[in-house]
Image: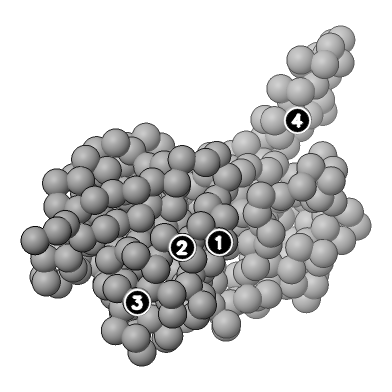
Amino acid sequence: MSKPYVFITMKIPDEAIEKLSEVAHVSVWEGDSPVSRQRLLDEVQKADALLCMLTDSIDQQILDNGTHLKIVANMAVGYDNIAIPYAAEKGIVVTNTPEVLSEATADLTFALMLTTARRIVEASSFLRNGEWTSWSPLLLAGQDVYDATLGIIGMGRIGEGVARRAKGFDMRVLYYNRTRKKHAEERLGVEYCELDSLLKEADFVVVLTPLTSETKGLISTNQFKAMKKNAIFINTSRGAVVDEEALYQALLEKEIWGAGLDVFQQEPVSTEHPLLQLPNVVTLPHIGSASIKTRTEMALLAAENIIAVLQNKKPITPVC
């Protein structure tokens, strides 16, 4: 009996490839950029399993081409890149990689808060460019994180991780979520409030909500106008949750003080992007979960989901 065939759309840690190779023939796209559309169409036609990235659009055409396809294992928590209802209709299992990346992403989110508030990137460039000629009281003065008010939009696992870190900085933590999380309130001492109240009260507004039809464009002109003039906006969820033009205008017109962004509407982002031109914005290339340990665990979880389905067992972390 021949082994099933697994296609992986980008190079992943060797441990995961080795695990899959024990039960399947494995092919990996070795390019530095995402796999081409045509190559993906060709590969999925013969694949029993697809291990994909959030950069891959797994739409109806791709799924229709997967005549033998049993599972699409997305190496991400979010799965807005996959046509979930259509996959379910076709009986194709879709899995994601929750939990294993929560703490790494919470680390990055808090690091982005600190970096933006204390103007770390700007200060480093100032020094390296030879602009530091003397000390002065207001030179590169930023905002305090300690004892500030943090507003978290989306109290999932990552949100709870950020809240735990905030408590070490003696921050007051507000949160807004589709459903109230009373266990988090009791365990972490966070306060639930409506979105409008959170925006008005928070010194830091952190977006951690998944991208859905309801959250697309959730933060736009009215939301930025509701924030404090000294507020710092952080997004480590998905770029499309935020209206980037509205954010640019809010920063340009000093309606808010600064922003830290790990995600954009279109990725990779052009160096000509308007938000990259502003000094009060810290930008990162979508590295929320990018620690060696976490990315390895994500790849292994995706592999384990594939192995389970290929062996007619229940997937570990099913989406559908």
* Residue type indicated by callout 3: Thr
In the rendered view, tell whether residue 158 sits above or below residue 48: above
Q: CA distance from mark 4 to mark 1?
A: 42 Å
- Earlier in the chain: of badge 3 and badge 1, it is 1
Question: Does residue 67 appear left or right of residue 290 in this picture?
Answer: left
Q: Nearer the viewer, residue 189 or 306?
A: 306
Q: CA distance from mark 4 to mark 2?
A: 46 Å
Camera-near label (4 vs 2) is 2
Look at mark 4 in the image and give the residue it sits on.
Answer: 122
The reply to whether dot 3 and dot 1 touch (C-beta < 8 Å) is no
Question: Does residue 129 appear left or right of residue 180 in this picture?
Answer: right
Look at mark 3 in the image and give the residue it sits on.
Answer: 67
The reply to whether dot 3 and dot 4 touch (C-beta < 8 Å) is no
Look at mark 1 in the image and give the residue it sits on.
Answer: 38
Q: Nearer the viewer, residue 65 or 194?
A: 65
Q: How many marks?
A: 4
Look at mark 2 in the image and give the residue it sits on.
Answer: 42
* Residue type indicated by callout 4: Glu
Position of the N terminus by quadrant = bottom left
The reply to whether dot 2 and dot 1 touch (C-beta < 8 Å) is yes
The reply to whether dot 4 and dot 2 touch (C-beta < 8 Å) is no
